[in-house]
Image (cartoon, rainbow, N blue to C red):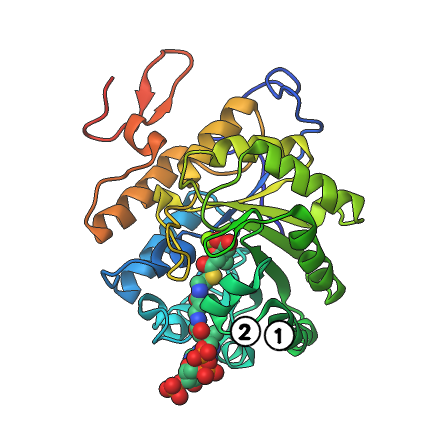
Amino acid sequence: MTSGTGAGPGSGGAEAGSTTGGIAGHEAVRIYEVGPRDGLQNEARLVPTEDKRHFIELLAAAGLREIEATSFVSPRAVPQLGDADELVRSLPGDDGIRYPVLVPNARGLERAEGAGARSVAVFTAATDEFTRHNIGTSVAESLDAFGPVLERAGRLGWWRRAYVSTAFGCPYTGRVRPERAVAVALRLLDMDVDEVCFGDTIGVAVPTHVRALLARALEAGIPVSRIALHFHDTRGTALANVVAGLEAGVRCFDASAGGTGGCPYAPGAAGNLATEDLVFLLDGMGLAHGVDLSRLLAAARFIAGRLGRPLASKVGQAGGWDPDSGRSIDAGADAAV
Ligand code: HMG
Ligand code: MG
């Protein structure tokens, strides 16, 4: 299954071709929700498992069909996700939603299997320095270690994604050339992953970088349908980067409800692109995605409340917009009208 279930109540109503600008084709866009995993992993305040479960239920009710649920990493490294086994065990197995989990090694896969997961994401990066901080190995060592993990997941019939973090810039070594990120992606595709996801881990990419990376990836023979993009909005460039991705043909974007997120091993990695900001953009462009903005805002407000802070995303504050009346919809309590 992939998401993009068509135009839901909040998915905009633009006529095909009328507002899609330079975006070729009108296939649905997959929104891959990372709030329960990337959104929470760096949060010091521990969120109870039942609240994480409720957050996931609210996201599903909003129409999200791919929800990265948690990570089977060392609980010492990421205490917030130490309840991964219990959380995954409590997820429905037959609701048509994909709940990928992050695994760093064979031990993680074993735990994921025991808990009943059925799709997995492995993660490495374009730079050795970040990878050493993140998982304690070089990129080459991580690729060697992921071979058997991905093979086992394949034998189990699981959907498999692989992240290439620091694809645009590294907090330890600076700007990353597209060739480096693409070379890692090619190795991962050789291991039969369904999708590679390029991560702007610390939010330093701008559209020209995205175009250059995608041009290189396509030149190297990577099908655009197997590429996803994961932007952190650290410096406010995530939505512009999404548009660059759309223009190059990418149709899967990661986002986190409420714009929470960060990586404990990437100093300066702030929130992910907020799902509600992405939904507003896609609605305005007339691109179907299947997510209801009002319900999504309810999910985002729920998790912001559990984290004890107001919703910081742009659309979380201003709300959606009704083009017939000109009024805001579901604006935050303190939004300007
Ligand atoms: P290590 O210490 O190098 O390895 O950790 P180790 O094999 O020596 O294990 C140390 C301890 O961890 C041992 O326990 C192991 O049993 C345990 P001890 O004997 O000390 O009590 N252990 C595990 N426990 C549970 N589950 C496991 C597991 N593996 C080992 N799977 C390790 C290596 C990778 C485990 C560790 O460094 C780790 O967990 N790191 C977490 C990394 C992480 O979660 N980073 C954030 C996600 S990546 C990201 O956010 C980027 C992304 O969003 C994309 C982007 O933005 O670009 C995806
Ligand atoms: Mg991330």
Q: Is mark 1 within 8 Å of ligand 1?
A: no
x, y percentage for residue 322?
39, 18
Q: Nearer the viewer, residue 245 or 297?
A: 245
Ligand 1 is located in which of the four quadrants?
bottom left
x, y percentage for residue 139?
60, 67
Q: Which residue is mark 1?
A: 141
Q: Is residue 209 visible?
A: yes
x, y percentage for residue 212?
67, 38
Q: Residues within 10 Å of mark 1 (few under 14, many from 20)?
A: some
Q: Are marks 2 and 1 in contact (CB under 8 Å)?
A: yes
Secondary structure type for disc 2: loop
x, y percentage for residue 239?
49, 33
User: Which image quadrant is residue 154 in?
Assistant: bottom right
Q: Which residue is mark 2?
A: 137
Q: Quadrant of the C terminus?
A: top left
> Which mark, residue 322?
none
